[in-house]
């Protein structure tokens, strides 16, 4: 069902646009900080065009960023809240980055912040595994000897909002993280949704079927929420020369980083949906340029085909394919409860899309509606009538789809694919 990325000697850290979570407040004071010493092509390009300042307790200058730890959670990895805010000013334009978070894990480390209402992963950190330590028992985490890199998403966000002449992803300096949390914080909630071995070599299997218990109300929802998501437009009208469809198997792969993230809790499949095999992610991603090195998880979902309404017109390569089945992403402690069901694969050239009936609870509380979640690339099938076989249809998230995830993704961010689609027509 979705995304990943480690290295043998070091953990390459780029879980791009990883969704943010609401973290419980610490009962005791936390200590430590995330520190980046600015150096490198991206840092030079940025500081040559903007002035950095900070609101206490954070500190920022052309030489360094200092983001003190104010709380968080420690489990197989550490998710840390950082205090203060950082303001970047270029001429008459300025942006303030708030709600800083640092993620430390051997499978990937990154630093994110909110730009307005949207969370953006600004930096990824590569560090040797032996220099990364996460201790759940003592609620401590550290990372040393890290190389910070400005992400493509971070560069784009700053370049756009500040009207910068140039700013690209690239080296940003050296990074270190130290954190000791108070005794009252809670770690990530493993709700029994399978087994996970952290560190990139483990496996996770989604919990099959069943009806999960109603999630408890989270303590706060400032980190993850769902915006006002409009209903999808009506399905494409049936073409005059359309044929009925006897079968159209396909596998849906969601974004790999989302699968890695949410698999810490629960991924539930039911109502005709079947979790795919435990495997490496089937294609390169921002996290794993070499798919064979990605974390082994169940990334894919198969849905039951509904032939009663499906149609396909070979002459125009258009059609609507209907499926049944449900995938539920549930993390009680973080207020995440999103249900995707009954997908529709709509083939319509540049307007091809993947529509789900989506509903939410907890911090994503909204009634079920059809939502155009993903755009699909247009692919011309290999035809040997009545069988039409398609190469993978790459998926990119829509504006409405991004709203489902608290706008942690930008429109057109890669978001998995529809694979192994094969349409068999009748009549």
Image (cartoon, rainbow, N blue to C red):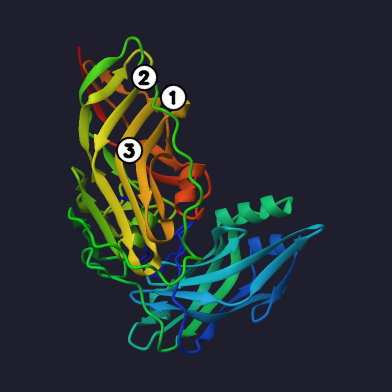
Q: Is residue 4 visible?
A: no
Q: Position of residue 389 (x, y in %)?
A: 26, 26
- Indicate the quadrant where residue 380 lies: top left
Does 138 sit above or below residue 114?
Answer: below
Task: Give me the residue at 61% from left, 68% from top.
Answer: 98
Query: Which quadrant would the C terminus be assigned to in this image?
Result: top left
Q: Nearer the viewer, residue 14 or 303?
A: 303
Answer yes or no: do the residues labelled 1 and 2 have beta carbons within 8 Å?
A: yes
Mark 1 Cα shell of 10 Å, populated few (<14), some (14-19), many (≥20): some
Dot placed on the residue nearer the N-terminal end, 2 or 3: 2
Q: Is residue 262 left or right of residue 61?
A: left
Q: Secondary structure at mark 3?
A: strand
Residue at 26% from the left image edge and 46% from the top image edge: 326
Say which element carries label 1. helix
Q: Report the Cα–Cα distance between label 1 and label 2.
A: 8 Å
- 337 relative to 226 in the view: left or right: left
Q: Position of residue 352 (x, y in %)?
A: 42, 29
User: Residue under circle 3?
Assistant: 418
As drawn, is 287 to the left or to the right of 303?
Answer: right
Residue at point 38%, 36% (across, down): 354
Q: Residue at x 32, y 16 (%)?
A: 314
Q: In this figure, which residue is indicated by the disc labeled 1?
A: 349
Residue 204 place in picture, x, y as percent: 24, 61
Q: Quadrant of residue 27?
A: bottom left
Is residue 43 positioned above or below 395 on the image? below
Q: Which corner quadrant of the image does residue 65 belong to?
A: bottom right
State the mark number for residue 317: 2
Single out the residue that lies furthest toward the right.
91
Question: For the residue carrying disc 2, how many other residues have a C-alpha within 10 Å: few (<14), some (14-19), or many (20+)?
Answer: some
In contact (CB < 8 Å): disc 2 and disc 3:
no
Mark found first going from the N terminus, 1 or 2: 2
């Amino acid at each position: 069902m979705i995304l990943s990325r480690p290295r043998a000697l070091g953990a390459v850290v780029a879980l791009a646009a990883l969704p943010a979570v609401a973290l419980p407040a610490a009962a005791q004071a936390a200590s430590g900080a995330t520190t980046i010493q600015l150096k490198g092509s991206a840092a030079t390009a940025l500081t040559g065009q903007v002035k950095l300042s900070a609101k206490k307790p954070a500190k920022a200058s052309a030489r360094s960023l200092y983001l003190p730890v104010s709380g968080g959670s420690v489990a197989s990895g550490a998710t840390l809240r950082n205090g203060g805010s950082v303001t970047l000013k270029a001429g008459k334009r300025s942006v303030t980055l708030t709600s800083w978070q640092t993620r430390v894990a051997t499978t990937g480390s990154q630093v994110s912040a909110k730009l307005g209402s949207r969370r953006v992963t600004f930096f990824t950190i590569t560090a040797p595994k032996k220099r990364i330590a996460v201790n759940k028992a003592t609620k401590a985490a550290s990372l040393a000897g890290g190389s910070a890199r400005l992400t493509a998403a971070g560069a784009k966000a700053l370049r756009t909002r500040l009207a910068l002449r140039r700013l690209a992803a690239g080296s940003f300096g050296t990074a270190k993280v130290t954190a000791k949390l108070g005794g009252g914080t809670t770690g990530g909630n493993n709700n029994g949704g399978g087994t996970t071995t952290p560190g990139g070599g483990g496996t996770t299997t989604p919990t099959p079927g069943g009806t999960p218990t109603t999630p408890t109300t989270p303590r706060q929802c400032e980190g993850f929420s769902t915006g006002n998501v409009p209903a999808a437009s009506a399905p494409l009208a049936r073409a005059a020369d359309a044929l009925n469809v006897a079968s159209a198997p396909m596998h849906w792969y969601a974004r790999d980083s989302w699968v890695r993230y949410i698999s810490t809790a629960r991924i539930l499949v039911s109502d005709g949906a079947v979790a795919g095999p435990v495997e490496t992610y089937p294609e390169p991603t921002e996290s794993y340029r070499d798919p064979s090195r990605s974390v082994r998880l169940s990334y894919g979902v198969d849905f039951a085909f509904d032939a009663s309404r499906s149609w396909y017109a070979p002459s125009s390569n258009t059609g609507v394919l209907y499926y049944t089945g449900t995938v539920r992403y549930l993390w009680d402690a973080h207020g995440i409860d999103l249900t995707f069901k009954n997908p529709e694969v709509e083939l319509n050239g540049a307007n091809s899309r993947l529509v789900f009936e989506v509903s939410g609870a907890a911090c994503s509380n909204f009634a079920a509606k059809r939502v155009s979640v993903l755009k699909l690339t247009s692919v011309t099938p290999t035809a040997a009538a009545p069988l039409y076989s398609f190469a993978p249809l790459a998926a990119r998230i829509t504006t409405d789809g991004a709203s489902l995830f608290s706008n942690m993704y930008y429109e057109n961010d890669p978001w998995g694919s529809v694979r192994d689609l094969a349409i068999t027509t009748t009549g």
